Image (cartoon, rainbow, N blue to C red):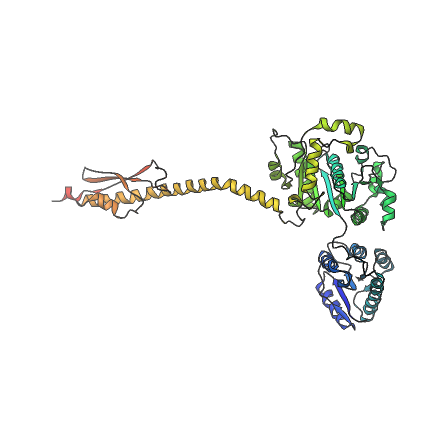
Amino acid sequence: MTGVRILSGTPDPDTARALTGVLHQLPGAEPGPALPDSTTLLDVLARAAETGVDELPEVVVVHDRITPVPALEVVREIALRFPAVGVILLTADPSPAVLSGAMDAGARGVAGLPLSYDELGARVEAAAAWAAGVRRHLSPRQPALPAVAGGRMIAVAGAKGGVGTTVVAVQLALAAQAAGKSTALVDLDLQGGDVASYLDVQFRRSVADLADITDVTTRVLQDAMYVHESGPALLLAPGEGERGEEVTDRAARHVLHALRQRYEVVVVDCGTQMTGANAVAVETADTALLVTTPDVVAVRAAKRMVRMWDRLQIRKPQDVVAAVNRHTRGSEIQPSLIARITGTRVASAVVPAAFRELQAVVDAGRLQDLDNRSTVKQGVWTLAAEIGVTGPPGPAAAPRRGRRGRGDQGQVTLETLGMTPLILLVLVLVWQAVLTGYTFTLAGHAADRAARAAAVGEDAQAAAADDLPGAWRIEDFGTTRADGMAGVTVGLKVPVLFPGAIDFPLTVHGHASAVDEEAVAP
């Protein structure tokens, strides 16, 4: 075993140190640093694959506790995307069931914990030999392995029934197909799916037929899917709603993963009811699209749906794109208000309210025949371009991990610019109020000094002006003498923040008196 590059992924630091130590002892092994999660592991392999097969490590060791993607899914992903890499599953339970599952997923061996030098060395040697054999049989003209696994998945869910979820999903799939992309449309509204009705399809097979199949191959998919006359391949909901319970979250994960390996765009109609199956679709989709209408009931339902996704840790509100259907300019609930209420990012492309355009094709069950001049079709196809279905991802299809897209940043910039004059006006008014309050203090202090000066026969007005800041001036001044008291009234003009711009029409008066010493002198 010479020059064997080994990449490992384990979330446990102690296991990582022990694994690295044992691998360093193997003759000819070149172990890399242990990676803490499956996302980083797959990203490293994808970057290496961009250059070519020769840049990939010969062996990858995967700990069975790796997250966020389960270990067997990671093994299957590596086996499908990088067939020239030998995968070893590291587990504390090397039982026959675990061994069988690992082999079905595509692993070349299973090593037990705690680590054994002899066992691990034998597994690494066997996996490296298998990887070398595969690479020898690859044609030198074979293109580099793809850096991205499969296609883009769009999960379309409805805030409530009747908001047009299926219409949007079907038109998104038709838009992707028209853009020249291989497209699959999956109906995961398992108890009430209407994709078949909207496209005039009668087909006996459904997603329920794939529920018990752990290895969903291309041949299996072909048998279960119906290629529609308009181009997209359809994976329909079961005709008997009770069979929807057969499609578990694990089965849905396998099916959706297999579809993404085969099609460039996968559109999933999740309906309005959350089950384990469509929750997987929303969680793993590149874009989660929540369809709502601009009415109070639908917006409240959208808010409930988003909060439920957040509580169940399916998807964060800021990672959800809301699509407004049946939009009218006169509606009191506009997209910006929906964004504030739900906490989602609302797509700038809206679908207008034009049911008459849809009525004929919906009644005929031929949504694919919707005229190109239809404003509904134009709205949905514009939405498709915005979320990256028909081209590069747009602003609303920002990455899932909480990062703002460019469109979001632009919207925030425009909103900030629009609010700037109001903010400046408020600051000016607050500062002017501060100046007014301070003037009251200065007027009282100046009156006290003037009264004391007047009581002893000195220049009272000069005493009042002696300690005043330069921005304040005496507007009026008066003295009185009666009953042995010297009284003074000082009026100060309130200055303005921008002198010369406006004249602030307010004069603040201060009053004070003192015993008239001249009047009581003997």
Image quarter in which the C terminus is found? top left
Image quarter in which the N terminus is found? bottom right
Q: Give the image quarter of residue 209.
A: top right
Q: Is residue 358 above or below residue 231?
A: above
Q: Give the image quarter of residue 287.
A: top right
Residue 483 appears left or right of 224: left
| Front-lying residue, 429 or 391 | 391
| Front-lying residue, 260 or 464 | 260
Residue 15 appears left or right of 431: right
Residue 28 visible in the current orientation: yes
Residue 422 appears left or right of 309: left
Residue at the image position 42 percent from the left and 41 percent from the top: 428
Q: Is residue 142 above or below residue 502?
A: below
| Front-lying residue, 30 or 84 | 84
Give percent across and percent down for residue 311.
68, 45
Q: Give the image quarter of residue 9.
A: bottom right
Give percent across and percent down for residue 143.
78, 57
Give percent across and percent down for residue 436.
36, 41
Residue sticking out furthest to the front: 141
